[in-house]
Image: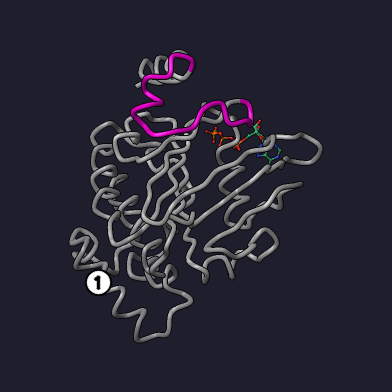
Amino acid sequence: MNPLLEMHDIDAGHDRLQVLWQVGLHIDEGETVVLLGANGAGKTTLLRTLVGLHPPWAGSIRFAGEDIARMPSARRIRAGIAYMSELGVFPDLSIADNLALGGYFLPAAERRAQQQAMFARFPDLARRPRAAAGSLSGGQRKMLGVAKALMGRPRLLVMDEPSAGLSPKFVDEVIGILRQAGGDGLAMLIAEQNVRFLDLADRGVVLDGGRVAAAGPVAALREDDAVRRAYFGMLAASQ
Ligand SMILES: Nc1ncnc2c1ncn2[C@@H]1O[C@H](COP(=O)(O)OP(=O)(O)OP(=O)(O)O)[C@@H](O)[C@H]1O
């Protein structure tokens, strides 16, 4: 199968501080990949580089066969890449307006149809569509973030720490929502510190100090002693 996304030899940083060192990553159509790493490992920098919010210093990014490394963010969205930042939603805007923003590039009729489809898929959001997103519970807010990202019918959904700030109960809820969001050929890249997200994944990539420390199918990663010691032990202990 041809990869949907291929990133090769990505170097990136902030001012003169290099954060990513020759990072490579690929995702096939419909595949879910979890990007694991401790605080400061470079996960957010890598995701922002992928979606066009942070220019890489070096390296290549191909999406659906096209070189997108210098493509502006707006065109990457139109090409099928949706990004859910750690914040996810605009808390002062209504649920309906958050969804409408997610479908900003769609023709009006399609945007309305997609909004109805999201309300049907996530009934919790349909109860009070005019309520501010900030009035939702933590889990529901993530649900809205996912629905907003799905509005534009992406081929790849990129998420930065969907579990951030959530209690274990809501983490379960978010994992359930993402399970529901998958399928239909949607690929997902999820940056996380919470190893429980590996349950969702086909493959994992472990970033350590801005370098890929390990990558492979989830089962193989769980068996990798170095990875277990460095991450799973530490992360399991932090749950
Ligand atoms: N805007 C910035 N200016 C300067 N340094 C930054 C900036 N953003 C991130 N960094 C630094 O880059 C490194 C990687 O940060 P990044 O946010 O990519 O890691 P992360 O793996 O997403 O961490 P976290 O899980 O804490 O969000 C860190 O050392 C961080 O201090």
Residue name at image x 67 percent, y 52 percent: 60
Q: Which residues are magenta?
A: 209-226
Left or right of residue 205: residue 124: left
Q: Is residue 55 magenta?
A: no
Above or below, comparing residue 57 to residue 102 in the picture: above
Residue nearer the viewer, 66 or 95: 66
User: In the rendering, at what x and y percent does residue 83 appear?
Assistant: 48, 56
| Quadrant where the C terminus is found in the figure | top left
User: In the rendering, at what x and y percent does residue 30 appear?
Assistant: 36, 55
State which quadrant residue 212 falls in: top right
- State whether label 1 is within 8 Å of ligand 1: no
Residue name at image x 35 percent, y 86 percent: 109
Type of the residue with mark 1: Ala
Residue nearer the viewer, 158 or 119: 158
Residue name at image x 32 percent, y 31 percent: 196
Secondary structure beneath dot 1 equals: helix
Residue pointed to by mark 1 = 117
State which quadrant residue 132 falls in: bottom left
User: In the rendering, at what x and y percent does residue 1 appear?
Assistant: 43, 55
Left or right of residue 146: residue 118: left
Residue name at image x 54 percent, y 28 percent: 39
